[in-house]
Image (cartoon, grey):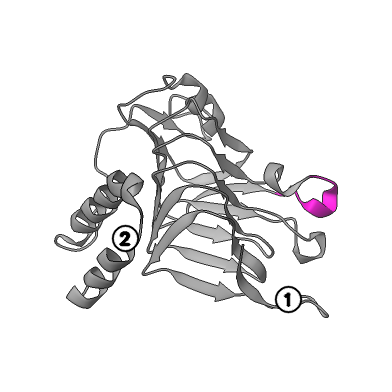
Amino acid sequence: MSQLEENQIIAFLRLFNSHNVKFMAIVILLLFILQCGGCQNISHPPNVIVAKNGSGNYNTIMAAVFASLNNSIAQYYIQIRQGIYEEYVQIDSWKTSIVFIGEGMDKTIILGNKSYGGGIGTYNIATVGVDGKGFMAQDIAFRNMAGAANFQAVALRASAEFTTFYRCQFDDFQDTIYTHYDKQFYRECIILGTIDFICGDATAIFQSCLIEIRKPLKGQYIAITAQ
């Protein structure tokens, strides 16, 4: 990251009011950690391992989430091994400081297909919904494969403060990432979609991310962001 980029990030963060000082400090610290010697992985030993083949502590991500402590200040590291996890993951507000560590955005994939076209409201269609403060994810793909014809189909809904995503992929058509609320940081992520695919009322920073527009259906328009 160049000095100019760093200065731009810091200048943007200074626009936050005084209640956001803690988030500002966390983001700057994260940027410092990531740029030292190139971007580094989260290397903390996992508390539990999720593996579809039975080689870990749990076969599903939600089982590992349920096993974590409630309202924890200490981070709880969940390693998610290679595989396609067809499940809906909900990080409730009392499940705080959870960290997901995958094996690569092309290897560890969380997959769902709920959609507005299927008769479900936008808030409840996310493949992964985050309400727990301090959530982090690295090297994971979040996908909603409902398809463009089903209107809104959220891959990630983030509604908690201090959420961070590093080297993650978000794949959908409409409303891919629902940055619903609070303060969020995304670095070196890939985001794919067609209509309003980064949407919501959160204060979110996207640094060194690839935003890729997919081909919409005939008659549909293209818009990257919406509030």
Tag 1–tag 2 contact (CB < 8 Å):
no
Name the residue tied to disc 2: 13
Name the magenta segment's main secondary structure.
loop
Answer with left or right where residue 28 lies relative to residue 207: left
Segment colored magenta: 113-120
Query: Where is residue 37 shown, x and y percent of the image?
Result: 14, 62
In the orientation shown, which residue stands out farthest toward the left?
37
Choose between 46 and 179: the one closer to the eye.
179
Amino acid residing under circle 1:
Pro
For mark 1, give the secondary structure. loop
Amino acid residing under circle 2:
Leu
Q: Residues within 10 Å of mark 1 (few under 14, many from 20)?
A: some
Name the residue tied to disc 1: 216
For mark 2, give the secondary structure. helix
Choose between 145 and 226: the one closer to the eye.
226
Choose between 62 and 177: the one closer to the eye.
177
